[in-house]
Image (cartoon, helix red, strand yellow):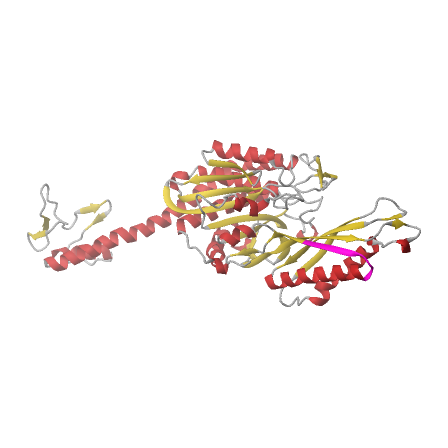
Amino acid sequence: MAAFVRRGPDRPHWRRGGPRPILNDHTHLSPGMFIPSRGSKVANPVVRRLRTLSRPPVRALAALLSLASALLVAPGVGAQAADASGLRADIDRRVAQVDGKVVAWRRDFHQHPELSNRETRTAKIVADHLRSLGIEVRTGVARTGVVGVLRGGRPGPVVALRADMDALPVGEEVDLPFASKVRSTYNGQEVGVMHACGHDMHTAMLMGAAEVLAGMRAQLPGTVKFIFQPAEEGPPPGEDGGARMMIKEGALDAPSPTAIFGLHVFPFASGHLTVRPEGLMASGDVLRITVRGRQTHGAIPWAGVDPIVVAAQIVMGLQTIVSRQSDLTTSPAVVTVGSIHGGVRNNIVPDSVVMMGTVRTFDLAMRGDIHARLRRTAESIAASAGATAEVRIDTLAPVTYNDPTLTERMTPTLRRVAGEGNVATAKQTTTAEDFGYFQQRIPGMFVFLGITPKGSDPAKAAPNHSPRFFADEAAMPTGVRTLANLAVDYLTQGATPTPASTRGQ
């Protein structure tokens, strides 16, 4: 540190060798900064501190230390704010440039949908695109999943963005030039295949966000992981897959993110966003009940045990679990039987019937209670008729639990992206998402993006999973901006990990 020697009332000189600039009325310290004479009134606290350099040496040294702190800290805060503002403006500019590509990708995926664990074409397009951006790519995660790693030019935390890629066994009934004509086999049946839940949009929007962020990598203070997930709708019977398998195979490792964000299109006003802390979407469990009777001639049912009648009684009995046995003031719940198969001919009582359904809950204790009641009800009704019921319940997805601290912190980002009046608190929905598995490992936030066209009534719009599901592409730039801004804002604000005990189920 340099010392000072007095050379007059207002003129301390640097003691070190070389030129000795005088700090007087108009000596510039940096562009636009000078020291006025002692008699003038000074509003700038930094300049006021500089004037103390003409005081005794000890006090001057203290003033210099204080000055150094002011110059290092205060400009840093301002620079950080300016940096964040510049990044946001860059995002908007780049989203506009990539919008045409995002629409083209979405239409291609929509026209060529692939069922769960079969997303090979989609995954290749995603991986090729990420590689073209210079992003590190790992393929074959959970069969067809793709993980990309974009390392920013500056040090910082790691954040993850996730999209799902699979379609549904639904025949499309929407009149579009890029409507799906794909047919496939699902569960032994020939079915149409359609992106009836918007995963084509999710994949295209995350590809767009990847291109936006890759173009800004030098300015990014940290790392972004892009997780393109297969089998969100559930793997085929007998197979593993989805978010749980991706985690097992290292999607959240090397590097490990401290937060994850995702979004899902939903039939409300196009471009609007909704989010809520804690439970947003229900847990989803797959129910399978096999009723075994005794086959006989349809004309003499007393000679056997009719599993079709027993199955019908079980269906009705299951409905009383939610309506008459569960305390719905605690939390919502749903039990639905969506499939019954048994018999091959009109005059033969079959030997068995297989029923499949779903269970949705938001509360862990209620979930366990309903599972126990399902088994008791099915088995007891079957036994009363001389049949048996084998009940199997497989966990498909946990509660989609938005970390409250993270949600509060990032909601201002949503308001800035969509507009203050276009962000609302979401209602809980008994639909399910296996994004909750990621949230069990790290804090996460899941957001809904509206895709009902302007002028249409969202209440009359076809819901997700309908063959008439229609999504407004005009909402996609908002989706791309949301993903990119969530990542950038999280990185620039720095990571604040949340203890696992607060992350729900």
Quadrant where the C terminus sits is bottom right
Horizontal and vertical percent position of residue 486: 47, 48
As rendered, which of 90 and 152 lies closer to the eye?
Answer: 152
Left or right: 4 in relation to 432: left
Horizontal and vertical percent position of residue 334: 68, 59
Residue at the image point whose x is 56% and y is 45% from the top: 245
Q: Work out whether residue 178 can be spotted.
A: yes
**Is residue 391 within the magenta segment?**
yes
Residue at the image point whose x is 60% and y is 44% from the top: 241
As rendered, which of 426 and 304 lies closer to the eye?
Answer: 304
Q: Which residues are magenta?
A: 384-392
Horizontal and vertical percent position of residue 125: 56, 33
Left or right: 341 in relation to 100: right
Q: Work out whether residue 270 can be spotted.
A: no
**Is residue 201 within the magenta segment?**
no
Residue at the image point whose x is 10% and y is 41% from the top: 19
Horizontal and vertical percent position of residue 259: 47, 51
| Residue furthest out toward the left | 7
Left or right: 230 in relation to 299: left
How many numbered marks appear?
A: 0
